[in-house]
Image: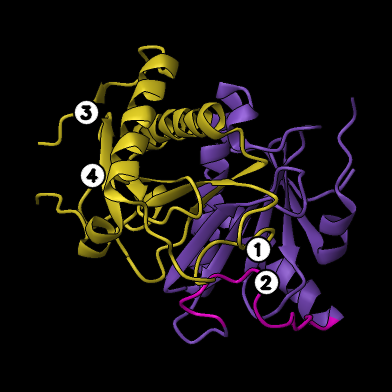
Chain colours: A purple, B yellow
Amino acid sequence: MIFKLDERLAQDSVYVAHLAWCQLRLHKDSRYPWLIVIPERPLVTELYELEYSEQVEYMRISSLVCKVLNASFSPHKINVASLGNIVKQLHIHHIARFEYDETWPGPVWGLGKAILYSNEHLQKMVASLRQTITEINQGEIDVNYHHK
Amino acid sequence: MIFKLDERLAQDSVYVAHLAWCQLRLHKDSRYPWLIVIPERPLVTELYELEYSEQVEYMRISSLVCKVLNASFSPHKINVASLGNIVKQLHIHHIARFEYDETWPGPVWGLGKAILYSNEHLQKMVASLRQTITEINQGEIDVNYHHK
């Protein structure tokens, strides 16, 4: 069975990179630097359903994403969450949070209204994130910026 | 430096078990079967700050907790999240969600009001969870039910 990105995820976010077998996407909501890791495994809805070796590699990927958020935005806290109550396809939020952001110290989901980046801002964010990923990744994870 | 459980976590939840070097606690809010994994590592606030070998073992622990929730409650979805905007000490929520629960499909944090278990119900939950942990754990994780 072939992996197909969920339509809602495709609509709400833009492609940043492939980190091994995971797709990394940037949420279009500019209120938070918000990255989403999507393991390209069809029908999987929970992390623990991945093969154990994949779970271990996922931890490396998640750590890299957190370090990229830290290096790029110096947030007060990073929120990492796999919820999936609405979109079942396994996706893990990695969100840089600030004590002055709109919904702090609450969660980001379901509160307030998304403020979309301009196209220009979105492109700059993606370019900057890719540069930071390249700088921080120490060759442990196979990184690719070309969406097949 | 010695690990000391955060006071707010201690107040909002009860001890269930030690899973290796992590404390497993049950949230007192009866609206959701809600387990919290707390790595007993002082000063750590993010998962990626753990040693890599600890991150790998954490994945085993988190998987066990999800399987215990699944076996015990057959939820529609499990929410796994490390937020920490209020309580900085690293703790990872593992919450069994149902399509008919109070805040579905929203997140559980900051919405509605906790409905506490009775003491009797809480004790039964803990006993039942321990039994399921013992049944599901295949000897991979060092499990202990005695709080030191």
Give the residue type at disc 3.
Answer: Tyr
Q: Specify which label sits upstream in the sequence, 3 or 4.
A: 4
Residue A36 occupies quadrant: bottom right
Please give the range of residues in magenta.
A103-118
Q: Residue at image x 41%, y 31%?
A: B61
In percent of width and height, residue B86 lies at 37, 71
Quarter of the image where the C terminus of chain B is located: top left
Give the residue type at disc 4.
Answer: Glu
Mark 2 and mark 3 residues within 8 Å of each other at the beta carbon: no
Discs 2/4, front: 2
Residue A111 occupies quadrant: bottom right
Mark 3 and mark 1 residues within 8 Å of each other at the beta carbon: no
Chain ID at mark 2: A
| Mark 4–mark 1 distance (CA, rounded to whole Å) | 30 Å
The secondary structure making up most of the magenta span is loop
Q: Specify which label sits upstream in the sequence, 3 or 1.
A: 1
In percent of width and height, residue A22 lies at 71, 41
Residue A110 disc label: 2
| Mark 2–mark 3 distance (CA, rounded to whole Å) | 37 Å
Q: Of residues A106 and B47, which is closer to you in this image?
A: A106
Residue at numbered disc 4: B40
Give the residue type at disc 1.
Answer: Gly
Residue at numbered disc 3: B145
In percent of width and height, residue B32 lies at 50, 51
The answer to whether residue A56 of the structure is visible from this angle is: no
Discs 3/4, front: 3
Residue at numbered disc 1: B106
In percent of width and height, residue A5 lies at 86, 46
Relative height, residue A83 to residue A107 (above, below):
above
Query: Tag 3: Cα neighbours inside 10 Å, few (<14), some, or many (≥20)?
Result: few
- Labels 1, 2: one chain: no
